[in-house]
Structures are given as structure tokens and as C-alpha cells.
Amino acid sequence: ACQALHWRYDLLSAAALAAFVQLAANPRQLFQTGFQLSFLAILLLAFLLPLGAAWLERLRQAGTPAFAAGLLTVALPLLTIQAGMVPVNGELFRQVPGMAAVINLPVVALTGLLVPYGLLVFAFDLVGFPLPEAAWLLGEGMLRAMEALNRVPGWIGLEPKPLGGPGRGGAGPDPEEAPAPGQPADDHRPSRR
């Protein structure tokens, strides 16, 4: 739209407008983790991606093979977001997903295929146009590939490990607050006599 109107596109202005519209509709969105992470990702892209692009250009000038440079060009935005999210994930979720950057590369690529494909299938179904069996098999194959990629960290023994002690972010209940085995949940605290 910006090209058609001969306007300059500005990522931060567009993000600010999107945040304003969302917060005008529901100010409580500001405290939602999804809202915060989405706009943090945009800020990371706006401020860190130019630094990564400069680094990538230095690699190209140093004689990096074209295939490796192309792969880094595709992966750079995702790696930028992952690197910036590590401290935030550690604080919010008490775990640092070490495999996220590796697994997200094929997952994002598959999602880039799966979402438009799903919208196309939905549009065809909406107008009553029958799809050939191959179209359904292709969608099923992409979904199975996505499910398999989600299981890779467990296959190689890299399940996310919670940070912190008991009672902090999924490491388990505090032993003093949890009922002992065989005791009812409402009568689990020792009496203080």
C-alpha cells in the first residue's frame, strides 16, 4: 500500500500504529505476554537486524560461499529474534529453549507454506469446489512434518529445563505447600502447635 501511495514504509511507525489500535480496543493487552512478545520481536527486528545485515555484508565481502550467505540471509531475522528473546523467555517462562533457533527455521518455512495453503483450501471449500485427493495428502504431509519437528528436542534429549527452584516457573510445587501422598488436598499443612 505504501508503494502505491508513494509513502515511505517505516517499521517502527507501523508497529506503533498497530500497538495503538490494539491498546485503544483493549488497554489490558499491554499486560498480556503475547502482546509484549510480539512487539518485542518487532523492536528486535528494527534495531538488531540492521546490525546483523552489516555483519552479513562483511561476511560476503570476506568471501563466504553464496549458498552459506543465502542461508544466513534467510535465517538472520529468525536468529535475531531468538537471540533477543533468550533473556525474556528465561524471565517469563523460567526456561531457555536452546533448540528453538534450530527447530524454528524449518517450522517457520513450513508455516509459510501451510498457512497460505490452508487459506486456499478454505476458500475452495467455501465455494464448494472439490479438491483432489493429492491436495489433502499434501496438507496432511505438511502437518505431520510440523508435528515431527515439534518432537525433535525430546528425541535428542534436549527437553527445556525449568530455571529456578521449587515453586518458580514449573519446577514443581513447593514441598511445604504440597499435600503429602495419601492426605486430602485441603488438609495438607502441618498443624502449628
Image (cartoon, grey):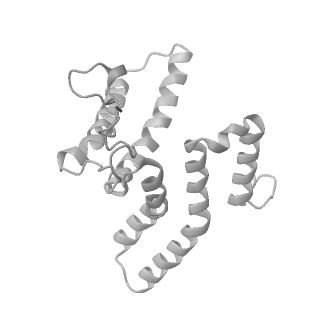
Q: Is residue 78 visible?
A: no
Q: Is residue 99 above or below residue 67?
A: above
Q: How many marks?
A: 0
Give the left or right position of residue 45, taking residue 94 as reference: right
Residue occupying the far top of the picture: 128
The residue at the point 42 percent across, 20 percent down is 131
x then y, percent, for residue 181 = 21, 26
The residue at the point 46 percent across, 54 percent down is 91
Q: Is residue 150 above or below residue 132?
A: below
Q: Quadrant of residue 25?
A: top right
Residue occupying the far left of the picture: 156
x then y, percent, for residue 21 = 76, 41
Q: Is residue 30 above or below residue 61?
A: above
Q: Is residue 29 visible?
A: yes
Q: Quadrant of residue 28?
A: top right
x then y, percent, for residue 156 = 18, 50
Residue occupying the far front of the picture: 193
Q: Quadrant of the C terminus?
A: top left
Q: Nearer the viewer, residue 31 or 40?
A: 31
The residue at the point 43 percent across, 80 percent down is 60
Q: Nearer the viewer, residue 120 or 156?
A: 156
x then y, percent, for residue 98 = 32, 57
Q: Nearer the viewer, residue 6 or 152?
A: 152
Give the left or right position of residue 171, taking residue 26 as reference: left
Give the left or right position of residue 6, taking residue 78 as reference: right
